[in-house]
Amino acid sequence: MKLNPQRGVGGGAEGNRTPDLVIANDALSQLSYSPTRGAGLGTGTAERFAQAGVSVKLPFPLASAPRIRDNRPKPGAAQRMILDALFFLVQAGLNLFFWAVILAAVLSLLVGFGVLDTRNRLVWTLSDFFYRVTEPVLRPVRNRLPNLGGIDLSPLVVLLLIQAAMLLVAAIRGYMLRAGIYF
């Protein structure tokens, strides 16, 4: 291809590429992942740079040797996998319990306002399940809160405690990562 100063490079779909674009495309097409420095540059590239009147100095070496990854298991990989699984299970359990408390509170409200009837077998089964799952945690909180009449704030307090526990687990994992105990 010959460089046309008025139109860029002849041919192609548009035929009106600027000299800078031509140089960039040419340089990128000539790159290689060869281990020797500069082996990826084709012949005539420097002449094409000079013809376009552009001097290029790259802040990095062209065609540097690629890094080879070591895929062997590192010492302590099994312990890290166990810690990953442990942190995942704790966070997943807290997240599931968070949603169980929300669903129990909503079901309790819907049953209390008469929207859902507990004589329906599905409604009774779901409300009984969520009551049995959440009540062991809600009861002690409810006993410590002041009596506000018909308003039960224990689900709100438990949700805040669950969020605090989730933040604590994330912080413990972060501290372990930074300390090098768990990478």
Image (cartoon, rainbow, N blue to C red):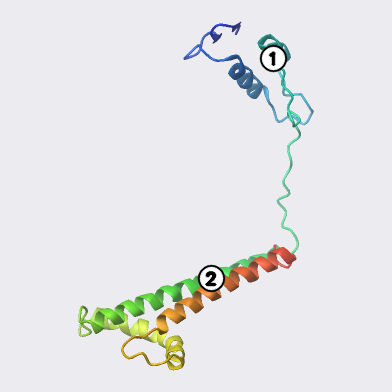
Q: Nearer the viewer, residue 77 or 132?
A: 132
Residue under the image location 73 percent in, 14 percent down? 46
Residue 130: where, in percent of width, then height? 36, 81
Q: Is residue 103 left or right of residue 69?
A: left
Q: Is residue 112 above or below residue 94?
A: below
Q: Is residue 135 above or below residue 85?
A: below
Q: Is residue 82 visible?
A: no
Q: Which residue is mark 1?
A: 49
Q: Callout 1: helix, strand or loop?
A: helix
Residue under the image location 44 percent in, 90 percent down? 145
Residue 36: where, in percent of width, then height? 79, 28
**Residues packed near mark 2 inside 10 Å, few (<14), some (14 to 19) or many (20 plus):** some
* Amino acid type shown at disc 1: Phe
Residue 106: where, in percent of width, then height? 32, 77
Residue 40: where, in percent of width, then height? 72, 24
**Residues packed near mark 1 inside 10 Å, few (<14), some (14 to 19) or many (20 plus):** some
Q: Callout 2: helix, strand or loop?
A: helix
Q: Which residue is mark 2?
A: 91
Instruction: Assign the N terminus to one quadrant of the image.
Output: top right
